[in-house]
Amino acid sequence: MRPFSLLVKPTSADCNLACEYCFYLPKKNLYPETKQHRMSDSVLEHLIKTYMETAQGSYSICWQGGEPTLMGTDFFSKAIEFQKKHGSARARISNSIQTNATLITDKMAALFATYKFLVGCSLDGPEEIHNLYRRTTKGNATHKDVIKGIEILKRNNVDFNILTLVSKANVDHAHEIYHYLKNMGFYYHQYIPCAESDENKNLLPFAITADEWGLFMCNLFDLWYPKDIFSVSVRNFDSILSKKVDGINDVCVMGDNCCQYFVVEHNGDIYPCDFFVEKPLKIGNIMETSWEEMMHSPAYLEFGAQKKQWNEKCSTCDHLELCAGDCLKNRMYQGNPSQNLSCLCPGLKTFFNHTQNKFDALSEQIQKER
């Protein structure tokens, strides 16, 4: 069986925050039968048991939401015990979690440290920027609680990185964001664009344009290169170097097929992608359907194949090797076909044109020093 990883949502879209730009919060409407969505022990164990029974070089589970820490520390303790119970003695298992960091406790952090969880923390910049869109369900600011949670992780020696969503709040502040994170002692960054649109394909008020994204990334690169290339890890840049140096696609967007992981909802429902959790795209339920069946289901294969069905202009583009047509989310928004150009295409071109020679030089340097 082809290797695959899992993106597990044990609380579905439930979250203690109500970030204005969150694309997943509306997914709670997929499961209206209950207000609170929590993965049961039976689903958790069956999920892990069946995954560990598949032939994988290594097993990778990312816990996400909504907000997965709403499950509490005991849930993740059970997940670890089930992994031990159903995995072979030689099985290599990696756990990661994406969190808003506001509910982190010392007990939870200690567990994450013991079992080497990689923790991704959402932080959009300094207080006045972060708090613009990232607020609680009661409308309260969250920045102080996020920093408190990160400090708990640091105190317990947990590996963590920072995920920054680039929106109208911070797109013009690359310099401020980058240096803020560095000054806070956060040296592992990832930046993702907020490009959400309404049913008329108009950008929502918090979303950014392709040109804004391109300029932000160019400015970010110039802050990072050459001074910080070995002291700050920016995943966006590391992925490009991984592709250039080793030919490895370490992020799904760089591949030419989307059949790389499964999304597991709280009740065991399986979907092909985080951005395509929609009833028509439901592949099965882990309590009823085997991974083998889902891996070879026409719905999954057809979805994955769309990645390579890019616009004809992509085939003659100098940057296709790195862009691969971009994420389907940015091509198929609001009912567009997969052949649609990414809504971020102009910005991606600007960025690649600006950085191509420097990435080539850096790639050569890395290869020579090996």
Image (spheres, helix red, strand yellow):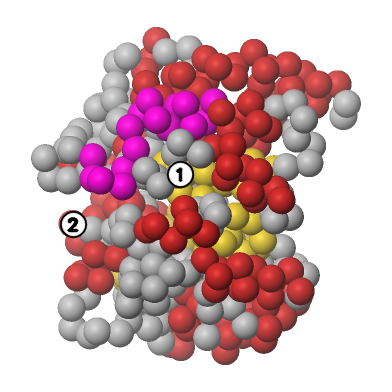
Q: Amino acid at mark 1?
A: Asn
Circles 2 and 1, Cβ within 8 Å, touching? The answer is no
329 to 185, vertically: above or below: above
Given this view, does label 2 or label 1 mark the residue nearer the observer? Answer: 1
Compare residues 263 and 103 and report the one nearer the observer.
Answer: 103
Whether residue 111 is visible, yes or no, is no
Within 10 Å of disc 1 (Cα), the crowding (few <14, some 14-19, many 20+) is many
Q: CA distance from mark 2 to mark 1?
A: 35 Å
Whether residue 142 is visible, yes or no, is yes
Tell me the quarter of the picture where residue 15 sits: bottom left
Compare residues 292 and 133 and report the one nearer the observer.
Answer: 133
Residue 280, numbered circle: 2
SS for callout 1: loop
- Residue 196 in magenta? no
Pinpoint residue 259: horizontal percent, then vertical percent.
Answer: 42, 46
Q: Which residue is mark 1?
A: 170
Could you tell me which quadrant the C terminus lies in? top right
Tell me the quarter of the picture where residue 109 sits: bottom right
Residue name at image x 55 percent, y 17 percent = 354
Residue name at image x 46 percent, y 88 percent = 41
Q: Amino acid at mark 2?
A: Pro
Q: Quick one: which residue is furthest to the right in this view? A: 369
Pinpoint residue 292: horizontal percent, then vertical percent.
Answer: 42, 60
Compare residues 60 and 234 and report the one nearer the observer.
Answer: 234
Task: Answer left or right for 237 relative to 131.
Answer: right
Pinpoint residue 10: horizontal percent, then vertical percent.
Answer: 42, 76
SS for callout 2: helix
- Residue 217 in magenta? yes
Magenta region, residue range: 203-218
Task: Answer left or right for 68 relative to 30.
Answer: right
Q: Quick one: which residue is furthest to the left in this view? A: 200
